[in-house]
Amino acid sequence: MAPYQYIERATPFNSKGGATLPIFAVTPAHIETGTIDPIALDWAHKAGYRAESGSLLLIPTADGQLGGALFGLGSNPSEQPFLTGKLARSLPAGEWHIETAPLTANRLSLGFGLGSYRFDRYKSEKAAGPTLMIPRDADAADIKRQLAGVFLARDLINTPTNDMGPEQLEAAFRALAEHYKAEMSVIIGDDLLKENFPLVHTVGRASADAPRLLELRWGKKGHRRITLVGKGVCFDTGGLDIKPASSMLLMKKDMGGAANVMGLALMIMDAKLKVDLRVIVPVVENSISANAFRPGDIYRSRKGLTVQIDNTDAEGRLILADALAYADEDAPDLMIDMATLTGAARVALGPDLPPFFTDDNDLARDLTEASLETDDPLWRLPLYNGYDKDIRAKFADITNAPSGGMAGSITAALFLRRFVTKTPSWVHFDIYGWAQNERPHSPGGGEAQAIRALYHHIRESVR
C-alpha cells in the first residue's frame, strides 16, 4: 500500500536503470584531481566549472544531445546534507541517476525528494520535473514514507483557510485514518460542552465553522502507548485582541501543529511500528463575532483549573489545555504535543530551529541524538520553574497571557505543563511551521519541523 497523499502527485523517483542520465555530484577536489568521468572532466575544464555548492553544469554528448550533469557539492558536503534537493528544481525534466557522490544513498535520495515538493494546487499550469533513481543501497520504502509525512504537513499548511477550515481539516484527518484503517471519532460544536471540552468550545464558538475535537486510534494494545496532540487553529484573527493586518498574512499556518502530528502519524502507521498510537487534534478558527470570548473572562478547563483570559490572541494554549488534559487521563508512555504557539520561540531561535520543552532528561538526550542523525534541527529550552509564578492570575488559577513579555515561549510551556500530571514522559514543541526562504530541500512555505527526528526516535525505541 502506497503512503497516504492529501494531494496526489507523481513520484519524484524513477526505476529505469540504464535508460537514465548520469549526475556526477562532485567537490572541487574531484575536479582538481581528475577523479571523475573523463568526458565530464574535460567539459568541466572547458567551462571553467569549479563545483561550487549547488552549482549545475549540463554535459552534452558528441552529437549535441544532453548527456548528463555535474552537480557541485562545495568543499564540505556535510554542511548541507540535503543539497541534492536543488537538483529537483534545477535539472531539466527527464530521468536521472547519481553516478558518483560522496553522500549516503539515503541522504541524497531524501534530499532530492524533499526538494521536489511543489504546491501547485492553484496553478493553471503545472510543469513536469526531473525524476531520480533511488540507489539500490537506500531504503526506498522509508524514504517515500518520510516524504509522504513531510508533504502532508506542507500541503495542509499551504492550503488557504477557505479550503482548510475546521470542516476540511477534519476531512483530511478522516481520510488519513481511513487509509490506515485507524479508528476515528469527532466531537463537534456544543457537544464539546457536554463532553467537557470547555476551552476548545470557548475559542472556536465565534466561527461559522464549528469547533471540534478529532481523535484517531491505531495499533495494538500492549505496545508502547504514544499520544500525539496538535494545535489546529485553522485561522487566527487574534480574536477581540485583533492582530494587525501584517500579522494575519500567515495565520493559515496556525494549524501547523495539527499538520505536523498528522505527518508524524502517517510515518508511524505506514511503517507499521509496534505502538499503541493515539492522535488528538483540537480544531477551531479564532474569529470575531458577538459571542467571541473576551479579555477578562474566566473559564474552567477540563482539568478543573480556572483560566483568566488576559489576551484572546493567546488562544492556542487554551485549546491545547483541554486536549492535553484529555490525553493525560490515559497516562500514555509518551505524549508529544506540537503547536505554532509563540513568537517568542522565533525571537529566541529563529524560524528554522524549533525549541522543545521536557522534564525528561533521557528523552531530551534521545531527541537531540535523533535530530543529529536525521539532520532535522531542534533545540531544548528549559521548563524553568522560576517563571511558573508568572502564569498565576489575580482572579483565577492561571492566566493565558502573562504580563511583561519576557520568556514567552517558556511561560507558554509552563502553562501547558499544568495540564499534564499523570504522563511520565511529555514533550512540547513550539514550531514555526513555515520556511521563509527557499532552501535546497524546500521551495519555501509550509514546513514540517521535527517530525523526521521524532519518527526516528519512536522507531528506534520500539525495535
Image (tube, helix red, strand yellow):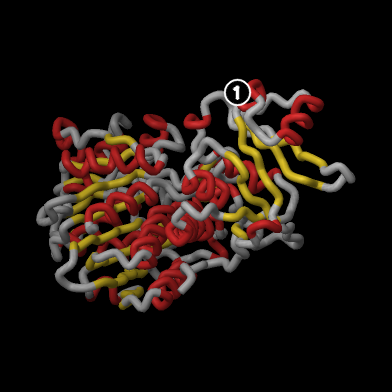
Where residue 419 appears, as percent x and y from the top left, is 17, 53
> In this picture, is 378 found above or below 323?
above
Camera-side residue of 401 and 97: 97
Q: Residue at x 18, y 66 (%)?
A: 223
- The answer to which quarter of the image holds residue 15 is bottom right
Judging depth in this view, the residue of 356 and 84 nearest the camera is 84
Q: What residue sits right under mark 1 in the picture?
A: 29
Residue 9 is left or right of residue 412, and the answer is right
- The picture quadrant where one finds residue 440 is top right
x and y percentages locating residue 45 in the rendered image = 76, 25
300 on left or right of 69 = left
Q: Nearer the viewer, residue 342 or 191?
A: 342
The residue shown at (52%, 40%) is 82
- Estimate the x, y position of residue 416 in percent, counting from the top left: 23, 48
Q: Is residue 273 left or right of residue 24?
A: left
Q: Nearer the viewer, residue 60 or 159?
A: 60
Residue 143 drawn above or below residue 453: below
- Few, some or many residues within 10 Å of mark 1 (<14, 14–19, 20+): few
